[in-house]
Amino acid sequence: RRQSFEFDIGLVPYVSYSESFTPLSGTTFDGTPFKPETGTQYEVGVKFHPRGTKMRFGAAVYDLRRQNVTTADPDHPGRSIQTGEVTRAFELEAVANLTNNLNLTAAYTYNDTGVTRSNNADLGKRPARTPQHVASLWADYTIREGALNGLGLGTGVRYVSASAGDYLNTFETPAYTLVDAMIRYEIDSWRFSVNASNLFDKYYVAACFALTQRNIGRGRTVLGTVTIGGS
């Protein structure tokens, strides 16, 4: 459920409320079936599109409470238990067409998370795999005249802060910063593009489930696409 109102200056404040219900398969170590995961989210935010400009700004604060979240069972490797979890977050986003050629997009999220209901030692701890800070910046430049008309170049940076590596917060998954890039060419109805994520093929740990269970982040990935649309 969401309510909003737009002012003449391009300001749109809003409030929203939502509930979730997700059945879970599997059982705990003693054979007890998992309860469905449930959640409620409250959000208050504002969007601003100044009249006569090509800029958009957004800010939001939300409170997300999840119950029966499955996490690794510390006493029985390979099994899971269920806990409660709360997330309070603040998000900022800005999109600006600085010129007819150059666009910038920036985003930042702050997460304040903690386990609020548990029969285990993770009570009050940060959930694993939830970074406190996530930020990104992307620049896109398009040539719109001359022999290179339709050629576009883009590059960006993504930052993910350290996160708890296990349910007791005894170690952390290190922070990492990745660089992405893009090149595209548009002519008539055709669009050719090549996108590269983790451009410099940086080695990093994307997430941890335990001290001996770590997911290595994806290396350099290059994807080329060709699309055609109507005129």
Image (tube, rainbow, N blue to C red):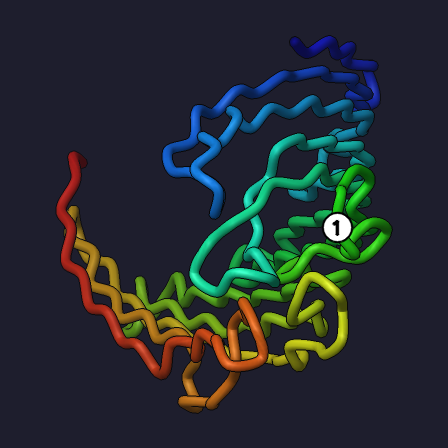
Residue 61 place in picture, x, y as percent: 82, 36
Q: Which residue is at the front of the view, 42 or 171?
A: 171
Q: Does 185 appear above or below 123? A: below
Image-based side of 58 in relation to 152, left or right: right
Where residue 144 sits, quadrant-wise, is bottom left
Residue type marked 1:
Asn
Q: Secondary structure at mark 1?
A: loop
Q: Going 47% across and 89% down the picture, which residue do you hit?
A: 202
Count of numbered circles in the view: 1
Residue beneath the point at 78% across and 21% down: 12
Task: State left or right for residue 133 relative to residue 189.
Answer: right
Image quarter where the C terminus lies is top left
Point out residue 5 in the picture as x, y percentages from the top left corner: 78, 10
Q: Look at the picture and state if 26 lies above or below 77.
A: above
Vertical placement of 69 versus 95: above or below?
above
Q: Is residue 159 visible?
A: yes
Q: Is 182 left, or right, of 9 in this rendering?
A: left
Comparing 35 with 207, the one in front is 35
Q: Quadrant of residue 230?
A: top left
- For disc 1, the marked residue is 120
How dense is the environment of label 1, judged by Cα within 10 Å: few (below 14), some, or many (20 and up)?
few
Please state the horizontal and vertical placement of residue 108, each as a whole percent of the image.
73, 56
Taking depth in this image into account, of 200 and 24 the one nearest to the observer is 24
Say if residue 10 shows up in the picture: no
Instruction: Choose top left, top right, bottom left or bottom right for residue 126.
Output: bottom right
